[in-house]
Amino acid sequence: MSDEQIDGAILFGDLSGFTALTEAHGDTTAVELLQRFYALASAALCDGARLVKTIGDAVMVFAPTPTAAMRTARLLRHAVHLEQRWPSLRSGLHAGPVIERGADSFGATVNLASRVAAQASPGQILCTRAVVRALTATEFVFRPLGEVRFKNVLEACEVFELVDGESSSMVEVDPVCRMRVDPFKASHHFRFEGATYFFCSARCATAFAATPRRFIRLT
């Protein structure tokens, strides 16, 4: 099978805290959530982007341009944000040459995009200068976060965060299962050492009340 090198952009998006969610709510809930996540990712593809593969709680997308990749990332984050009792999405993008073999994509561009996604906090969309440079004078606004050194990457990489209304939305995170919680609608909350924690359910609130320090370390 011959390899083909093409220019494009890679997007990785993964659900933050998915392991904690599985532990708190069980395998059946986790599998159902993943199937829904994959469907949302497929529906968010735009401007020629395609879903390369799913990797557990993550998706990998190839887009022919950085603009297509960023629009897909923003649409996917919005779709995840609309889901009730879900973890947050964190995303990373990089642009450059990609080796295509069959339906899969490989190379340094893919590796760096994965590293950038791992650097993101829940709800963040991060990208490299290669992406920002290609999106100059478009609808996107970015905040520079400085240089980051990633494991097994020789050169330091400049990282940027997409800035928009959704990235700054006020949400709380259930410290037990890592689901997003609207503090104004949460049915359960618990006060501990001067801080208030919000929960998706009585089950998570009870688990936290029994051993709060176990979960505070994870937030």
Image (cartoon, helix red, strand yellow):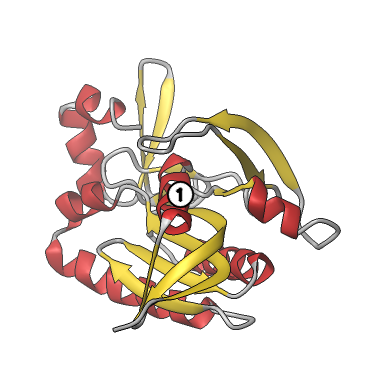
Q: Residue furthest front?
A: 2
Q: Position of residue 111 (x, y in %)?
A: 40, 52
Q: Is residue 165 left or right of residue 64?
A: right
Which residue is under mark 1? 112
| Image point (22%, 50%), residue name | 19
Frontmost residue, 15 versus 59: 59
Q: Is residue 167 left or right of residue 104?
A: right
Q: Position of residue 9 (x, y in %)?
A: 56, 65
Q: Quadrant of the N terminus?
A: bottom left
| Residue 196 vertical position relative to residue 60 in the rendered view, above or below | above
- Does the rendering let one see residue 40? no
| Residue 170 vertical position relative to residue 18 in the rendered view, above or below | above
Q: Quadrant of the C terminus?
A: top left
Frontmost residue, 111 versus 182: 111
| Image point (63%, 33%), residue name | 145
> Could you tell me which secondary element the residue under label 1 belongs to?
helix
Q: Position of residue 135 (x, y in %)?
A: 75, 59
| Residue 52 vertical position relative to residue 57 in the rendered view, above or below | below
Give the image quarter of residue 86.
Answer: bottom left
Q: Residue furthest top?
A: 193
Q: Position of residue 142 (x, y in %)?
A: 72, 46
Query: Label 1 sits on what residue type?
Result: Leu
Q: How many numbered circles does the render carry?
A: 1
| Residue 39 vertical position relative to residue 77 in the rendered view, above or below | below
Frontmost residue, 152 versus 71: 152
| Image point (41%, 75%), residue name | 100
- Does the rendering let one see residue 25? yes
